[in-house]
């Protein structure tokens, strides 16, 4: 295979990879947008139910104030009718909150899977470049193995590296500490 054929083959592979990546990205964005829309809808439903409950809570408060003002000892403070009326709304609110928690968990898990897939794709892209460079005698076997090992370490320690990045973004560690931790892991 001459240099032109190698270049044409490499260009085709890059094009195929870009097509598949774009397709996967489109599907991921659609799913994420759908999940975000459903979460927004649940939060709106939650707000509506909470607004309905506020008027019932105000009625209970009003009755309590009247009870305290009239407190002659014989009257009982009764709001059972209001509590009975709000029972379905409280159940609905609890259900919506449960759905919100599940949806947030789903979104968080999808984001994590997407990030992990991205790390795997980055590793595969690096490996592919290294394979091509090695095949074209641009890298020695030792250079190839060192670079591949470094990329593999990054992938193998993905979860730990992610946690360190979160520590930095939360201000728990300084940039110097971050650099030291990353260097120690990747050595």
Image (tube, helix red, strand yellow):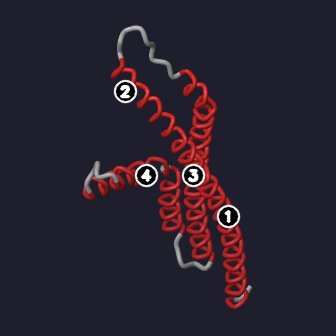
Residue 165's x, y, as percent? 39, 54
Q: How far apart in space, not on screen, are marks 1 and 2 (Cα)?
A: 52 Å
- The local crowd at label 4, few if under 14, some if 14 to 19, many if 20 or more residues have their Cα within 10 Å, is some
Nearest to viewer (mark 1 / mark 4)? 1
Q: Nearer the viewer, residue 107 or 19?
A: 107
Please tell me which of labels 3 and 2 falls first in the chain. Answer: 3
Please tell me which of labels 2 and 4 falls first in the chain. Answer: 2
Residues at discs 4 and 3 in contact (Cβ within 8 Å) = no
Please tell me which of labels 1 and 2 falls first in the chain. Answer: 1
Left/right placement of residue 109 relative to residue 168 reads: right
Q: Nearer the viewer, residue 151 or 163?
A: 163
Q: How far apart in space, not on screen, are marks 3 and 2 (Cα)?
A: 32 Å
- Residue holding disc 3: 44
- The answer to whether residue 97 is above or below residue 77 is below
- The local crowd at label 3, few if under 14, some if 14 to 19, many if 20 or more residues have their Cα within 10 Å, is few
Q: How far apart in space, not on screen, are marks 2 and 4 (Cα)?
A: 57 Å
Residues at discs 1 and 2 in contact (Cβ within 8 Å) = no
- Residue holding disc 2: 65
Please tell me which of labels 1 and 4 falls first in the chain. Answer: 1
Residue 74's x, y, as percent? 41, 8
Q: Please, what secondary structure does the residue beneath circle 4 have?
A: helix
Q: How far apart in space, not on screen, are marks 3 and 1 (Cα)?
A: 21 Å
- Residue holding disc 1: 30
- The answer to whether residue 107 is above or below residue 62 is below
Q: Please, what secondary structure does the residue beneath circle 1 have?
A: helix
Q: Nearer the viewer, residue 187 or 3?
A: 187
- The answer to whether residue 153 is above or below residue 128 is above
Res. 182 image quadrant? bottom left
Quadrant the N terminus occupies: bottom right
Tell me which residue sits at (67%, 64%) in the image. 30
Q: Please, what secondary structure does the residue beneath circle 2 have?
A: helix
Nearest to viewer (mark 4 / mark 3)? 3
């Amino acid at each position: 295979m001459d240099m032109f054929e190698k270049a044409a083959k490499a260009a085709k592979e890059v094009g195929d990879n870009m097509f598949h990546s774009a397709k996967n990205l489109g599907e991921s964005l659609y799913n994420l947008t759908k999940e975000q829309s459903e979460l927004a809808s649940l939060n709106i439903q939650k707000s509506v139910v909470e607004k309905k409950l506020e008027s019932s809570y105000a009625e209970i408060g009003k009755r309590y104030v009247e009870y305290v003002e009239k407190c002659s000892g014989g009257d009982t403070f009764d709001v059972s009718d209001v509590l009975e009326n709000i029972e379905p709304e409280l159940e609905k609110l609890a259900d919506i909150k449960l759905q919100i928690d599940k949806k947030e968990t789903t979104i968080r898990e999808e984001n994590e899977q997407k990030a992990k897939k991205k790390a795997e794709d980055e590793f595969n892209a690096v490996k592919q470049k290294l394979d091509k460079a090695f095949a074209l005698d641009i890298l020695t076997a030792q250079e190839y193995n060192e670079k591949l090992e470094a990329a593999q370490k990054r992938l193998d320690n993905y979860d730990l590296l992610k946690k360190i990045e979160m520590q930095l973004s939360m201000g728990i560690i300084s940039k110097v500490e971050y650099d030291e931790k990353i260097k120690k892991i990747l050595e």
